[in-house]
Structures are given as C-alpha cells and as structure tokens.
Amino acid sequence: MMLRIKRVPTVVSNYQKEEGEEGSRRGGGCGRNCLQNCCLQGARLPLYTFKKVDRIITEQKDVFEHDKSEPPVAFLNSLLLGEWEDRMQRGLFRYDVTTCETKVIPGRNGFIAQLNEGRHLKKRPTEFRVDKVLQPFDGNKFNFTKVGQEEILFQFGESEDGEVKFFPDATIDAENSPSVVAINVSPIEYGHVLLIPRVLDCLPQRIDRDSFLLALHMAAEAGDPYFRLGYNSLGAFATINHLHFQAYYLTVPFPIEKASTKKITTLDGGVKISELVNYPVRGLFFEGGNALQDLSNTVSDACICLQENNIPYNVLIADCGNHIFLLPQCYAEKQALGEVSSELLDTQVNPAVWEISGHMVLKRKKDYEEASEENAWRLLAEVSLSEERFQEVNALIFKAISNSGNCSGTDSENVLEDANVEHTSLEEVNAINENSHSAMVTGSPGCLVLQ
Ligand SMILES: [Zn+2]
C-alpha cells in the first residue's frame, strides 16, 4: 500500500514553488539570493551565539544561571521579533497574521481557535509518502537552501568562548553549515519562525540528539514561557522533508500545558516522565534533569525510537525548554485508510503540533464560528493512539531510553516496572520491537501502516 500526501496545506517560503519554475536570473548567482553555492559567496547574516548552559533550575522563575555581565535574556526575543517585524514591513508574508481572528473556546480546556483563511492555498507543491516517518533528503524538492536570504533572520549557534555574543553582520561559514532562524511566510501567530539546524547539510526531517539540544537551547535563550517550539515528523503533518522546528509566541497557555499528568518514572539523570491524563491526545511529558542535556538526550532518544519504528509523532517544547510533550499520532494513517469521518475531513484541519497542543487553526469561517470544546476534543481524539497501542509504544520508548544509557544502573526491566506497563513483559516488548521494524504489529489496532 502506498499512501501519499497529494496536497500540502501551506507554503512556508516564498520560494516554495512547483518544480521547474525558475526564478528570474539577474545579477550574480541564480537571481533568488538563495543559500546555495550560486549565491553564498560574500553573503552575510546576523549571528547570535549562545552560552552552553549546564543546569536548569526548575524551582526558580529565572530559568538559567546567567552571569550579571551577560546581556539580558530578553535579547534573543528582541532580535527575533525585531527582524520578524522588519520582514513584515517588507511584505514577505503571504498574509497579515495580526488580523486573523482568535478566541478562546469556552470550556474546561481553554482551546484556542484561530480563523486563518490565508493559509489555505490552491497551489500544492510537494508530494511525499505519509506512511514513512524517515525518508531520504531529496534535493530536487523544495528545501530551505532554496529560500531567499531575506527570509533568514539570523544564524544561531553555540558560542566558541562561552559568552553570549551578537554579530550584526557576520559572514556565512558554509564549511560549518550554520543553523539559522527563518520566517515562516504562512505564519499562524506573531513571530512564527523556523529553526533549521545546520541548514547547508541538508538533513532530512529526523530528530537527532544535537539538533534537539539546539532547539532546547533556543527555548532557553528566549527565556519566554510564551515562546514555544514545535516539531512535526513526516506522517504527522510535517510538509517539508528538511530538518526544521517551528516556533512562535502565544500569550496564553496552551491547553496541553494545563493538562494533568501522572508520573511514570524518574530516570537516573533526574528526568521525570509522566503520562498526560484527561487530554484528548495520549502523550508523554518530560521535565527536569540534572542538566539540559539529560532532558534533551532522553527526549531525543524517545523520538529516535519512534522514528525507527515508523511511528509518526509531534513534540512541543514549552516553559523555556523545561517542559516537553511527546505525542505519537495516527491521524494521517486513519485518513489514508478512510477511517476519519467526512465531517472532520471537511474542515481540512491538519492536526500538527499546534493543533494537538490546543491551538486550533481553522480554515473555514463556519468551523470558527461553531468552534466548541466538544468539536476540538472530537478532532483530537481521532489523532490519538488507542490506550492499548499507546502502552505498546511506551514500552518501546522505555526500552530505547534504558538501552541508550539515560538511566545507568537501572536495567530496562526495572524501568518497565516503574513505568507501570506491567501488562507488557520484556519478551513482548522485544516482539513488538522486532515486528515494528517491519512496520506491522499483528493484532494491534494501532497506526502503523503496511508497506
Ligand atoms: Zn542562488
């Protein structure tokens, strides 16, 4: 069975066009002032370097230990928003997101609805399979090396000398493939940007430890609880197969951030893992850790496990990098298998990380006007794995985490016991693991798709 996304809901860059459509050639380079060899010669972009932080102090309001000599934590925010507003002045966005209507839906969860008709698009440029979470990078398809340099806000990387630094006009070191922050030309909120790790290395949409740590550093540097980063895997509504995180500011709590949690276990590195309770999408919640890297490694290893088992997922990084939500999902597969009601399909809402976190971006005025907690809940419930499948997937995750040394001194059996998944023996876990590599769990109502 071959499942494909025939339509892609949004355009994230002004250079994301049908293949074969060439920009007009003028002056030097290809004429688009892109990030490829044709245009990189002599190119310059601002550069922000962050200091590697070692500790998270979860009890305190100021999240990180900063020397008094350092620039205020707010600096990254002002840089990001200043550059973002500059691009808005220059008319680089496809619509003015500040005019999109938004409301909080009455009810216990406080879902947020936005009417965003501008995001709806007739042109559907990319096509790739939705049944494979990992796919090789394809340089012929749209990727972020094809965006115009004016869409890039700044380069973002770790400081070489341990100090926060800002260079307003730095060269682009192509040899070392900088990570960059770019605008999303179809924003869903104020300050909507993309973080593209090592952009010139052309990494496919796939979490690795270093890239995830970079995203956590960005959340920490921003130091603003209203600034969250999100990640969508392929098969969970990522639309570009080039490694990227999204981020934006929303000045109200996301419903997922207010959801109750039930503790599963605390790992040796201090990372506490819980399960979401009374939330329409089943998911894991990670917090704590003796160092930022503990939290980062644990979550990235969980993501890597899901990827390798071909399970689509979304990640939300909240609370300045202290709180991370991991949500395996199965909507695209259900959709492809014809198991989603036409009522839900008609809304054309793609439940990616923001929707799953409770920020519903609606394309039709009708849906916006009729938005209710019940409707939001109904959509998100379709996204969630079943309880049985969720526990199977958790068993895979805990096995992966324990194998990768995040809980030295605790063998995987103990973690599984801690994890309250006593219905799954280790043998069964192994069996699931092996079966999942062939992307099929016999007898499971889960969401892996036959290949
Ligand atoms: Zn070029």
Image (spheres, rainbow, N blue to C red):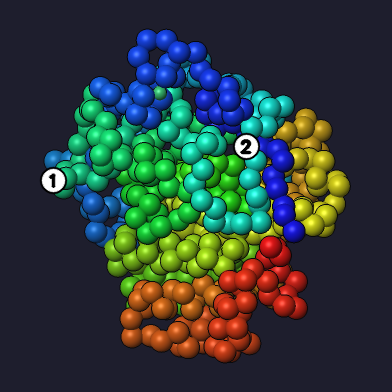
Q: For the residue marked with disc 2, what is the amino acid?
A: Thr
Of the four image quadrants, the one with ligand 1 is: top left
The mark tally for this picture is 2
Query: In the depicted view, which residue is nearer to us: 304 or 60?
Result: 304
Q: Quadrant of residue 367?
A: top right
Q: Residue at x 42, y 10 (%)?
A: 26
Q: For the residue with label 1, is its CB less than 8 Å from the closest atom of ligand 1? A: no
Say whether residue 153 is visible. Answer: no
Which residue bears the numbered disc 1?
Answer: 161
Q: Residue at x 79, y 57 (%)?
A: 337
Q: For the residue marked with disc 1, what is the amino acid?
A: Asp
Q: Quadrant of residue 386?
A: bottom right
The picture places residue 93, in percent across and down from the top left corner, at 54, 22
Helix, strand, or loop for circle 2? loop
Helix, strand, or loop for circle 1? loop
The picture places residue 444, in percent across and down from the top left corner, at 73, 75
Earlier along the polypeptide chain: callout 2 or callout 1? 2
- As drawn, 248 above or below 65: above
Query: In the depicted view, which residue is nearer to us: 436 or 250?
Result: 436
Q: Residue at x 72, y 41 (%)?
A: 6
Which residue bears the numbered disc 2?
Answer: 126
